Image (cartoon, rainbow, N blue to C red):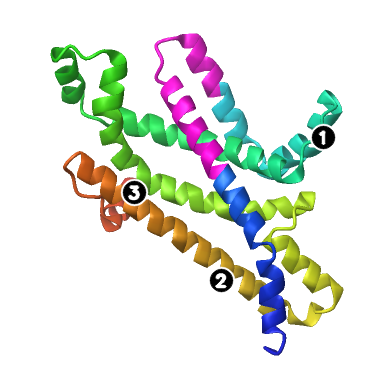
Amino acid sequence: MFENFGLFASTIANGLLLTVEATIGGIVVATVLSFVAGLAMLSRSKTVRAITRVYVEVWRGTSEVVQLFWIYFALPVLTGFQIIPLWAGVLVLGLNFGAYGAEIVRGAVQSVPQAQREGCIALNFTPAQRMRRVILPQALVEMVPPFNNLFIQLLKGTALLTFITVPEMTYQASQVLVTRYTGQAALIWTIVLFFYLALSLVITGGMKVLERRAAARVGRKPVKQESVLGSASGSGAA
């Protein structure tokens, strides 16, 4: 069963770079959109809030696979511009997970105590100074754990790019499977699972470092995962 392990691992690893590129690109786009849309939902302008809410609900409320097909197959028909498959995947991942991230940003900003805002007003800070120097640094500590989960979900979402023939890890595994080694599906997909697990651990490690630094910047301790899970289960029971 394991005589072809090296062949399978090397073939699947050929798609590792594209998986990493799609993940990093998606994370960058999703992070930017999360902050832009999250802060826009707190705008005083009803128009800005309404436009942002439409974006969030459309991209959260429709199938990610359909979004991918629409961007890659339908949009070129409407615009006459064919998108490179990898770019289409990055765009869909960024737009989709950016919609979820917007709610994370909005909730974290709103969780900053009102007394902090009042203190900023007393110090005669401008709205931009309040957000940049006081509110966002505190909100960032609350954002990191849910963003960690979001980025891992985004990583796993890169497997959808196989539908538009991006030769990432899942695509490479499926090609090996259908060509010669259909009887070794268990081994092939187990290798893929471990590749994704390794990447997710890298993301988690990086986010843990970011969380500690964000917490240290505002003189706080990072939120313990146990307390987060406990509060979530408690709210669910309620």
Magenta portion: prevailing SS class: helix
Residue beneath disc 3: 210
Amino acid under disc 3 = Leu
State the extent of the magenta-drawn residues as a range: 26-53
- Read off the residue under disc 1: 82
The quadrant where residue 40 appears: top left
Sequence-earlier tag: 3 or 1: 1
Residue that carries the numbered disc 2 in the rendered image: 194
Q: Earlier in the sequence, mark 2 or mark 3?
A: 2
Magenta-drawn stretch contains 49: yes
Nearer the observer, 7 or 235 = 7
Answer with mark 1 or mark 2, whichever residue precedes in sequence.
1
In the figure, is residue 176 to the left or right of 208? right
Above or below, comparing residue 210 to residue 181 in the picture: above
**Marks 2 and 3, Cα distance to the nearest angstrom?**
24 Å
Distance from disc 1 to disc 2, alpha carbons, whole Å, reads 34 Å
What kind of residue is marked 2?
Phe
Residue at x 74% of width, y 55% of height: 162
Where disc 2 sits, the SS reads: helix
Q: Residue at x 85, y 78 (%)?
A: 180
Quick check: 93 above or below 162? above
Image coords of residue 29 (percent x, y)? 55, 37
| Spatial separation of the CA atoms under disc 3 and disc 1 | 37 Å
Q: Position of residue 181 (x, y in %)?
A: 80, 79
Asked whether the residues under the numbered discs 3 and 1 touch, taking CB atoms below 8 Å apart as contact, a structural biologist would say: no
Q: In the figure, 197 relative to 209: above or below? A: below
For the residues carrying marks 1 and 2, which lies nearer the camera in this image?
1
Circle 1: element type: loop
